[in-house]
Image (cartoon, rainbow, N blue to C red):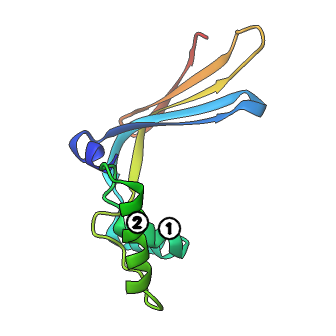
Amino acid sequence: KGEELQAHPAAALVVYWRELDRQVRARGMVSRLSAADSDSYFAGRPRDSQIAASISPQSRPIERDELERLYREAEERFDGAEVPRPANWGGYVLDPETVEFWQGRESRMHDRFLYASRGGSWEIARLAP
């Protein structure tokens, strides 16, 4: 995902609440989270997660046995020591250009509102279901 975002820094995210029949979708450009913020987030992750991140050849094919071997080696290497954040590990920040709020209805007459960023302000439009 990170390599894709580096090549094409646009993304969308969706949060859906089935129980409430609601959804929020945001689309926009992404930028890399600062190293300091990535360090802080990584430090707050569970140790097992830190170790897994340190050995993972992210999204590359790997045999399970090889992955587990790398993990065990890293556990030994970092025994009692802080696990450093891998250089390629970090987050992205979405700068939303549009945000859509959707409220489902049994009649299929859903409520949809689109907020679109236009020169420092937000225009709001109701969308047809």
* x and y, in percent, of residue 94 in the image: 41, 46
Which residue is at 38% across, 78% downward? 73
Farthest residue in the front direction? 65
* x and y, in percent, of residue 4 in the image: 28, 42
Asked if residue 104 is positioned above or below residue 91 in the image, the reply reads above
Which residue is at 75% across, 16% downward? 105
Which label number is shown at residue 53? Answer: 2
Q: Are marks 1 and 2 in contact (CB under 8 Å)?
A: yes
Which residue is at 63% across, 31% downward? 23
C-alpha span from label 1 to label 2: 6 Å
Residue situated in front as seen by the camera: 76 or 31: 76
* Quarter occupied by the C terminus: top right
* x and y, in percent, of residue 8 in the image: 25, 39
The answer to whether one can see residue 38 in this image is no
Residue type beneath disc 2: Ala
Farthest residue in the bottom direction? 80
The answer to whether one can see residue 70 in this image is yes
Asked if residue 13 is positioned above or below residue 56 in the image, the reply reads above
> Which picture quadrant has residue 17?
top right
Which label number is shown at residue 49? Answer: 1
User: As drawn, is 15 to the left or to the right of 81?
Assistant: right
Residue situated in front as seen by the camera: 45 or 54: 54
